[in-house]
Image (cartoon, rainbow, N blue to C red):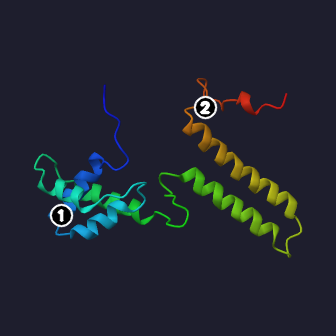
Amino acid sequence: MAKKQSKTALTLLEKSVIKALIIDGWRNQDVQALINTGRAASINFGRISGVKTDNAIKPATKQQVETFRHKKLLFDHVTGLCPIDNERLVRAREAMILAVGLFNTPRIAFKAGVFSMLANVAWTYLLHQYYESKGVPLINKDGFRARFKSLSCG
């Protein structure tokens, strides 16, 4: 039986990126800061040193390193979300912020209609994220949107 990877364990991509960054002359503390951005559990210098001394780990390509760095730069430290990994949650949050902002604007007359539409968009993104996280398919075998029995009103 395969052993479950712990939250503190480095992924293969992280190990190869660390190796490439060390080869490029990055300092351990800079590598640690980049890798820890957005992680649930941070890593320490010992893990970086372990990757540095392990000759079996192949360094990542320049493209992989740039993609990894770009994704880390997009991480929002306030919400803890990354628009790449948490696209639906980011969109749900933005739709609800926009709905509330428009509703609180005194110069707009059609507040209730716009608020309800944007709130519906936000909840739809949230529910799609929830069902995807539970493994429920959003589209059925015929290519149509699945109907969720748990949400039916009758």
Residue shown at 66%/43% (left/top)?
127
Q: Nearer the viewer, mark 2 or mark 1?
A: 1
Q: Is residue 35 above or below residue 136?
A: below
* Residue farthest toward the right in the current orientation of the protein: 109
Which residue is rendered at x = 43% and y = 54% of the image?
40
Where does label 2 land, which residue?
139
Is residue 7 left or right of 83 when viewed as pictured?
Answer: left
Secondary structure of the residue carrying numbered label 2:
loop
Q: Quadrant of residue 103?
A: bottom right
Q: Secondary structure at mark 1?
A: helix
Q: Earlier along the polypeptide chain: callout 2 or callout 1? A: 1
Quarter of the image with the N terminus in it: top left
**Hey, what amino acid is under mark 2?**
Ile
Q: Can you give x and y, in whole percent of width and height, for residue 67 in the image?
A: 34, 58
CA distance separating discs 2 and 1: 44 Å
Q: Is 140 situated left or right of 116 in this image? A: left
Quadrant housing residue 27: bottom left
The disc labelled 1 sits on which kind of residue?
Answer: Ile
What's the mark number on residue 99? Answer: none
Task: Give the residue pinned by disc 1.
Answer: 22
